[in-house]
Amino acid sequence: MALNNVIGIDHAVIMVRDLDKAAENYRQLGFTVSPRGTHSAHMGTGNYTIMFDPDYMELLGVLAPTEANAPARAFLDKRGEGIERIAFTAVDSAAGAEEVRARGLVPIGPTDFERPVTLPNGAVSAAKFRTFMWPTAEAPGGVRIFACQHKTRETVWIPELMKHANAAKRIRQALVATPEPAEEAAHLARLIDREPTSEADGAVTVPSGGDRADFVYLTLDQLGKRYPGVPLTGLAERGGAALVLVSGDLAATEKALGSVAVRSGDAICVPPAKANGTLLAFIAG
């Protein structure tokens, strides 16, 4: 039975060393980037969000070392920048955590936190969340998973932040490199009660739920064959990750990306070295 309180991919977390520089880099790639947010003290992190519909990307940086951000710091030390974790949307984080516990795992949380938000009219409000994580060791393909309940969606999905010069609309796939795609896909499938499907090139897809983006596990070589001509420098053999983004206008995408753009088949790509350790592949919607 699928988890009742956890639905598909909510957002992908890109761990970065210098938060402000990363935000400026993504602006240069044609994304509309939210104002900087600072999480609660026990989290010790700050972020910028890049909002789509129904999902988003998050640039996350450590502002002060805390127990809560120790795994994120370890990720930066070991692998450098890139996708460190992926969130599911939680309908109810407390109930979702209990569903995971009933399956014999010990979830982390639920944890409540918030960050101040400056709205387009200049007013200051707050974005409030309740999250829980699967155990840190349960990271299929080297990418951690957690669930995020949005208690104030109106302060996160702000219409002015959802329009991008590069025409990005949503996440279609989260691609995770690993030497053992079938094994890692089966691992995720067990954690979220979904059915994996093998692809013709040897990759394995796991639907995240609803109409949300799929997870795709594949070797680094298979990833390279999907996007020929795109340098994969910096992507780890296990845990290196990419996002396939739907574009509403590939001509606008190519124009916004400028010299960074690499055409590869039907996709327009940004190599990981130009996107803080994450391969971005834009495809037609």
Image: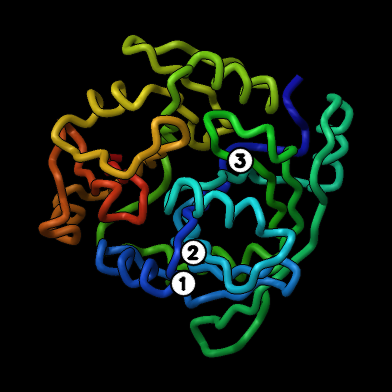
Q: Quadrant of the C terminus?
A: top left
Residue on which disc 2 sits: 49
Give coordinates of residue 237: x percent, y percent. 39, 31
Residue positioned 18% across, 58% down in the render: 257
Q: Residues within 10 Å of mark 1 (few under 14, many from 20)?
A: many
Residue on which disc 1 sits: 34
Residue on which disc 3 sits: 144
Q: Is residue 218 above or below residue 229?
A: above
Q: Outermost residue, front direction? A: 77
**Residue type at the position of mark 1:** Ser
Whether residue 246 is visible here, answered yes or no, is no
Give coordinates of residue 33: x percent, y percent. 41, 69
Give coordinates of residue 277: x percent, y percent. 36, 50
1 or 3: mark nearer the eye: 3
Residue positioned 35% across, 40% down in the render: 235
Q: Is residue 125 above or below residue 186?
A: below
Q: Secondary structure at mark 2?
A: strand
Q: Nearer the viewer, residue 255 or 68?
A: 68
